[in-house]
Amino acid sequence: MTLTILFYHACPFIDSRNFCRIFHYFLFYFCIDYILKSFYNKINETS
């Protein structure tokens, strides 16, 4: 989490804004993937 905060605050100082956009999209999809996997794991454990 600290890395995401550091990158988020460093973004305005980084010249390439496309990198920040790609980085945030990557984090967004990674979080969704992680949540879905943990969700499916819970379903498999209960069944």
Image (cartoon, rainbow, N blue to C red):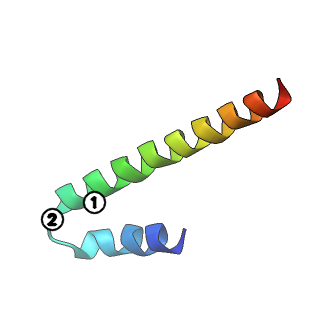
Proximity of marks 2 and 1: CB atoms separated by less than 8 Å: yes
- What residue is drawn where x is 18% and y is 55%? 18
Q: Amino acid at mark 1?
A: Cys
**Where residue 33 sits in the image (x, y, percent)?**
51, 40
Q: CA separation, marks 2 and 1?
A: 7 Å
Callout 2: SS: loop
Instruction: Please state if 45 lies on the left or on the right of 17 as rendered.
Output: right
User: Would you identify the image quadrant in which residue 4 lies?
Assistant: bottom left
- x and y percent of residue 41 in the render? 69, 36
Work out whether 11 lies above or below 29: below
Q: Position of residue 15 (x, y in %)?
A: 15, 70
- Labelled disc at residue 35: none
Q: Which mark is residue 16?
A: 2
Name which quarter of the figure residue 45 lies in.
top right
Tell me the crowding category of disc 2: few under 14, some 14 to 19, or many 20 or more residues within 10 angstroms, Cα based.
few
Q: Quadrant of residue 8?
A: bottom left
Q: Secondary structure at mark 1?
A: helix
Disc 1 residue crowd, few under 14, some 14–19, many 20+, Cα 10 Å: some
User: What's the residue at 52%, 47% (across, down)?
Assistant: 31
Quadrant including the C terminus = top right
The residue at the point 46 percent across, 73 percent down is 3
Residue sitting nearer the eye, 30 or 12: 30
Question: 10 or 2, which is in the foreground?
Answer: 2
Could you tell me the amino acid type at mark 2?
Answer: Ser
Q: Is residue 18 left or right of residue 9?
A: left
Residue designated by label 1: 20
